[in-house]
Amino acid sequence: MTDDTWSPPRILLAVDLVILTLRETRLHVLLVERGIDPYRGCAALPGGFLNNDREGLLAAARRELDEEADLDATQLHLEQLGAYGDASRDPRGRVVSVTYLAIAPRLPEPTAGTDAARAAWRPVDAIVSGELPLAFDHDVIIADGIERARSKLEHTPLATAFCEPTFTISDLQQVYEAVWGVDLDPRNFYRKVQKVPDFLLPVDSERRVTKGRPARLFTAGPATTLHPPIPRPGHTVSRQGE
Amino acid sequence: MTDDTWSPPRILLAVDLVILTLRETRLHVLLVERGIDPYRGCAALPGGFLNNDREGLLAAARRELDEEADLDATQLHLEQLGAYGDASRDPRGRVVSVTYLAIAPRLPEPTAGTDAARAAWRPVDAIVSGELPLAFDHDVIIADGIERARSKLEHTPLATAFCEPTFTISDLQQVYEAVWGVDLDPRNFYRKVQKVPDFLLPVDSERRVTKGRPARLFTAGPATTLHPPIPRPGHTVSRQGE
DNA sequence: ACGCTTTTTGTCACTTTAACAAGAAGATAC
DNA sequence: GTATCTTCTTGTTAAAGTGACAAAAAGCGT
């Protein structure tokens, strides 16, 4: 079947990043404007090819995060999303893209004067609705990234990655509301998240003030999974009667 | 930074499969004995390189499933697990492996006389405990695959992929017990899975008989996620009192 | 018919949840 | 300085869900 002289095809390997953040209570993703063909001038995910054949995938993701978004990977949540390798996804030839999902706390506009100058935060609604066309299959990748984030909010402390090192419970609630696109009762949310062991650690004697009563501050605890989980509402629970 | 003549490195791209099934109430994974160096004679995941640069990743996974395991991909659950691309994982050079998780119903030993002859089902315990050494980083990949399956059992109808087209609720319970490594109460399990909308569809007027009372048969329903989920026990829920 | 096994239905104390009321702690207006 | 506004925090309560176990049902073998 496979004769001994056959040698497997060599592939171009790209790393692309879905970087999510919250801005004004809405979920945003970082996009760059492509400077070269194909899809020149089109919006696309930040990313690029491996630097050399010694660079690991995660290392490449961290490098792109720094180069294209001016973000420090050691401060962010960064996890692999998946590999996208349809034969026809890139007109230049066979490119397989390994994608990573990054979560960043509230951030200013990408710094001008850096390589990140071409980058801008875009509300995700505009992308999933198809208003803003994207290069390659990047719309699918973003949709997968959002779904990953939505799902992990239920069972992991991922929401804290959207927050500053210390945060209030209503900060956290805004994350859940923005990512899930729902409204939650602040009073039940307040107790529910605190009841999860090792999810939140209180930062004693610190309070943040805005308008109303000052709120307690918390830090992310050591939990890696939430027990019990924070269930996503509306997601059709059991109907009774009918 | 990147000068115009620079061209990105070309990479060897492999596809590897974690194929799980239940045999005698224990979880097994399909392994092959490597016929070539490196790791000749060592146990490894079935897999191989892309056939040509027109073959999609999923297509390659399906092909390997057929060639190396003699399994029909259209009958199986098959999903991407992840990309493994540490620079040092393959001594031959830079190989990035895109892995897939497949779930198969109870199956006979791999058919002799086919390309799958070198393949054999191995209990996963022997692998996670390190008794049975594996080629490359395949032990890590298997561990990730098992964890994926364990987790998806809670929130998706994945367990039905371990079963025949029609199955009883205690068949289903055996899947949960084997994959999670726990004991479940048959009576509570019986009602819990039936309460989840669209998880199980009863097959009327059919019953399977073994020893005791004949059991109702079911088919997998249209649900893609389970609401409410089937929670994994022991996983440290809230402690009260203390 | 009797006992054996497995499936299916019942029951009940207990916990968790959602919905809403109300109190607490500041800032601001008057 | 007191009233009012806002937001955070604690209480309360009816309803729903959960886990543990009893018991009935439906076959098979003797």
Image (cartoon, coloured by chain):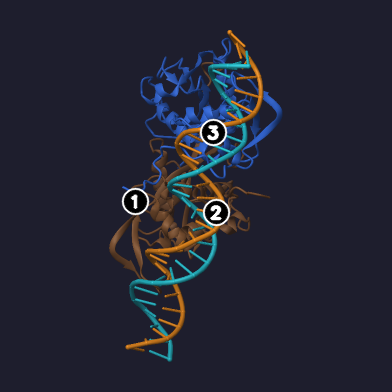
Chain colours: A brown, B blue, C cyan, D orange
Circle nearer the viewer, 3 or 2 = 3
Crowd tier of the residue under label 3, counting other residues whose Cα lies within 10 Å: few below 14, some 14–19, many 20 or above:
few
The answer to whether dots 1 and 3 both sit on one chain is no
Q: Chain of mark 3?
A: B
Question: Toward which corner of the image does residue B111 lie, by quadrant?
Answer: top right
Residue B55 visible, this angle: no
Q: Is residue B23 above or below residue B224?
A: above
List the residue tagged with mark 1: A221
Report which residue position mark 2 lands on.
Answer: A233
Protein chain holding label 2: A
Q: Are marks 1 and 3 in contact (CB under 8 Å)?
A: no
Residue A137: which numbered mark, if any?
A: none
- The residue under the point 55% across, 18% down is A2
Name which of mark 1 and mark 2 comes first in the sequence: 1
Q: Position of residue B31 (x, y in %)?
A: 48, 20
Decide: is B167 above or below A206.
above
Q: Give the spatial CA distance, label 1 vs label 3.
A: 37 Å
Q: Position of residue B47 (x, y in %)?
A: 51, 24
Residue pointed to by mark 3: B187
- The CA span between labels 1 and 2 is 24 Å
Q: Nearer the viewer, residue A171 or B235?
A: B235
Secondary structure under badge 1? loop
Q: How many marks?
A: 3
Residue B177: in sight, yes or no?
Answer: yes
From the image, state whether disc 1 or disc 2 is nearer to you: 2
Q: Is residue B115 above or below residue B140?
A: above
Nearer to the camera, A112 or B110: B110
The residue type indicated by label 3 comes to Arg
Query: For this view, does B87 lie left or right of residue B21?
Result: left
Mark 1 vs mark 3: in front = 3
